[in-house]
Image: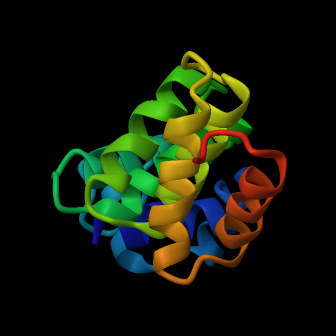
Amino acid sequence: AWLAYALRLDALGEENLGDMQNLTKWEKDFLGGGDYSPYESAPWVISNQGVAGSWMHHAAGQGDMAQAQLNLGVWYTLGRNVPKSLPQAWYWFKRAAEHGLRDAEYNLGLFYQDGSAVEQDSRMAASLFQQAADQGHVKAHLSLGACYMEGVGVN
């Protein structure tokens, strides 16, 4: 539920958060603007961005929510719903990759390939591209092919 709600808030966009007509009754109650809220007339003080990021963090912190961990990696890379932070992006991609998510493995490979947030390591990049490619990730196949063509990170 945490992941689904964070993605819903992300899809709504910050400009629509204050429009109560776009939200379900449950969402209004949760954020303090619905029938069952003790803060019936409370203004919306939390931005959509902050709420989406907070909920995604909660989902990712559950440990088994690899998709939420991947999403946080993407969000931190782009500065979407959270402040831009490549070290945080790397951390969340690493956690998601530990669950075998091919997109996370590919993104980690990119970090190691160009030294973003971590020390450049061509062998690690190629290994991660291989793991993602083994699961059918098309861009990982292309990146791994480039590693072989250039003789970088592979034997």
Left or right of 99? Residue 124 is: right
Residue 60 position (above or below residue 91): below
Q: Position of residue 79 (x, y in %)?
A: 69, 35
Name the residue located 40 percent from the left edge and 66 percent from the top edge.
Answer: 101
Residue extending farthest bottom:
136
Left or right of 102? Residue 149 is: right
Name the residue located 27 percent from the left edge and 56 percent from the top edge.
Answer: 37
Residue 80 position (above or below residue 133): above
In this orientation, does residue 28 appear? no
Name the residue located 75 percent from the left edge and 64 percent from the top edge.
Answer: 145
In this orientation, does residue 148 appear? yes
Residue 106 position (above or below residue 93): below
Image quadrant containing the N terminus: bottom left
Residue 23 placement: quadrant: bottom right
Q: Position of residue 9 (x, y in %)?
A: 56, 62
Taking depth in this image into account, of 26 and 125 the one nearest to the observer is 125
Residue 148 placement: quadrant: bottom right
